[in-house]
Image (cartoon, grey):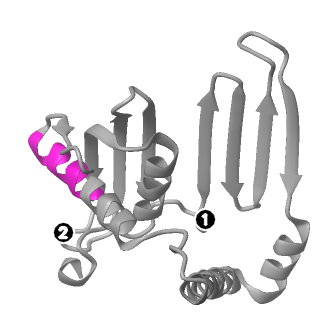
Amino acid sequence: DVRSSGGGTLMDNGIHLLDLVRWFLGDVAEVKGYSRQSLWAFAGCEDNGFALLRSREGKVAMLQSSWTEWRGYGFFLEAYGTRGFVRASYPPMLLQIATADGPGRRLRPRRKWFPLFQVRERLRSYRWTMVESFRREIEDFMAAVAARRPPGSSGRDGMLATALAHAIYQSSESGECVRLADST
């Protein structure tokens, strides 16, 4: 129900991707977005969202959030820099890192698998992953409060990720690139 959720996939699983984009890119200056309701008949809720985002420093990201994957939930993130790249994916949970001494140099790849996590998830189901994630987030928040330090993420982070989702909706409706205010 869009009155409760505020939107579709961009406000559901996509909001976490938008938060990660902000973490990697910093403040986002502009967004070109597309959203489409093509499979699920949830009024006002897109089942696919796409965006190109550019930071104030000129870094660029591309994002897709979907409710139309036919087999489970998938997550894939890639980030490229001047000395290599990092890729994270789930399922299976995998981290790939490749670094070089400079542009055009030979990459040194490394992979990190999480076999214990995968076994636990197979034995306990994907719901265990959700519950475990929420449990750890709450523990981290409680530890931050007890130590009088800021938590890993803030309400402001959530607000700015939500502002990005709304900018994607606005861009999709208008067909234009949306420039964001300096605080976003």
Disc 1, SS:
loop
Instruction: Please tell me whether the stretch drawn in magenta is mainly helix, strand or loop.
Output: helix
Residue 75 drawn above or below residue 97: below
Say which quadrant the N terminus sits in: bottom left
Residue 123 covered by magenta stretch? no
Is 103 left, or right, of 119 in this rendering?
left
Please name the residue shown 50% across and 54% down the image.
20
In the orientation shown, which residue stands out farthest toward the left?
A: 174
Q: Position of residue 140 (x, y in %)?
A: 62, 81
Please name the residue shown 39% across and 28% down the image.
57
Estimate how packed mark 2 is, as few (under 14), some (14 to 19) or many (20 or more) residues with alpha carbons within 10 Å.
some
Residue 166 covered by magenta stretch? yes
Please name the residue shown 68% across and 53% down the image.
89
Residue 63 drawn above or below residue 66: above
Residue 41 sits in quarter: bottom left
Task: Please report whichever mark, 1 or 2, sits nearer to the chain's N-terminal start.
Answer: 2
- In this orientation, which residue lies closer to the viewer: 141 or 94? 141
Q: Amino acid at mark 2?
A: Gly
Disc 2, SS:
loop
Residue 44 is tagged as 2
Badge nearest the viewer, 1 or 2: 2
Please name the residue shown 75% across and 15% down the image.
102
Residue under label 1: 71
Residue 174 drawn above or below residue 147: above
Q: Which residues are magenta?
A: 165-174
Q: Amino acid at mark 1?
A: Arg
- In this orientation, which residue lies closer to the viewer: 96 or 161? 161
Q: Position of residue 74 (x, y in %)?
A: 60, 60
Q: Position of residue 64 (x, y in %)?
A: 44, 48
Residue 127 is tagged as none
Estimate how packed mark 1 is, as few (under 14), some (14 to 19) or many (20 or more) residues with alpha carbons within 10 Å.
few
